[in-house]
Image (cartoon, rainbow, N blue to C red):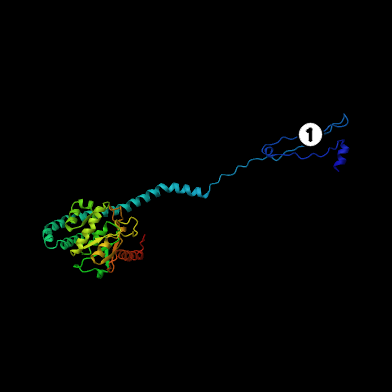
Amino acid sequence: MGTMTRSLLGLKTLPSFAPLNCGLASRNAVSSPVLMVADCRSNSQVDRILRFRCPRPGIPIRKRPTVQRDTVARLAIAASGPADAAAGSVTGSEFQLVPRIKGICFYSVTAVAAIFLFAVMVVVHPFVVLFDRYRRRAHHLIAKIWATMTIIPFYKFEFEGMENLPPQDIPAVYVSNHQSFLDIYTLLTLGRSFKFISKRSIFLFPIIGWAMFLMGVIPLHRMDRRSRLDCLKRCMEFVKKGASVFFFPEGTRSKDGMLGAFKKGAFSVAAKAGVPVVPITLIGTGKIMPPGKDSILNSGSVKVVIHKTLDGKDADKLCNETRDAIAQTLLLHGYGVH
């Protein structure tokens, strides 16, 4: 049908052309129509063939900007952030303010009580040196009253295993884990006349350091090897004279609340002197007054567990048995052990 129409019109049939190749660049721009003219055989006829090739233009489509959900969430958080952060900081500051106030009150009470009780200690000191030079039980009684007056208003404490304590007139080596500055206060309430070992710098504190001197507390310079040897010799002398001594075998307060390794000095004294070892576990003091934060006092309670006494001539065995007894108790109460 198409061929007959072309013959009647006198137009020449042209061979079919290959489709124009529109590359990617041509699709992005609108192409103009292509005009193709074919010459006729006769001069009177002009065959015109118009062929249009209009590639489909690639019109860029603007996508509607979308906001992701996480962006909306971030914007919402950013909008409410300053107010919430301010509220959180206020709450945190209030949370830290109360322990600091309690800490100030704690040291105020202990200072006031120490002043009056130290005066009593000074008055009775000549009689103590004359009649009870090594045990100094009167001084320890005053120290017990001072410690009890200080800690009762601020935290509760309880004792377990009091029946395991040896009699007052039997010398022994007491050992305990060390968690906090409050350990000394708590242990003084036991009512036993034992000699502590303390840093020399503590003796420079007014009232407290002077009272420690009157009680016969043994000074120690930790970094001096000769001082450590002299300390052990003095402990041996006290034990032979009928007095008890107290050691923190870890050497210092635990920074993370976990039980550390034990030094063998205390157990060497017990093994050589032939006196029993009294293991004691302190629970809770590190949470009330954490190490390194002696200016604050949190709420809480303290438990003191007195274990059965241990005897023996092997210092290593005594050390291991004592540490195992304390470690088992700490693990039962949720504390860790190194």
Q: Quadrant of residue 110?
A: bottom left
Q: Residues within 10 Å of mark 1 (few under 14, many from 20)?
A: few
Which quadrant, please, contains the N terminus? top right
Out of 191 and 9, give the one closest to the viewer. 191
- Give how far across and how far down residue 83 sits, in percent: 40, 48
Out of 181 and 21, give the one closest to the viewer. 181
Q: Which residue is mark 1?
A: 36
Image position of 233 with respect to 12: above or below = below
Which quadrant, please, contains the C terminus? bottom left
Amino acid beneath label 1? Met
- Give how far across and how far down residue 80 sits, in percent: 43, 48
Q: Quadrant of residue 328?
A: bottom left
Q: Quadrant of residue 46?
A: top right
Secondary structure, mark 1, is strand
Out of 94 and 10, give the one closest to the viewer. 94
- Residue 78 lies left or right of residue 307; in this view the side is right
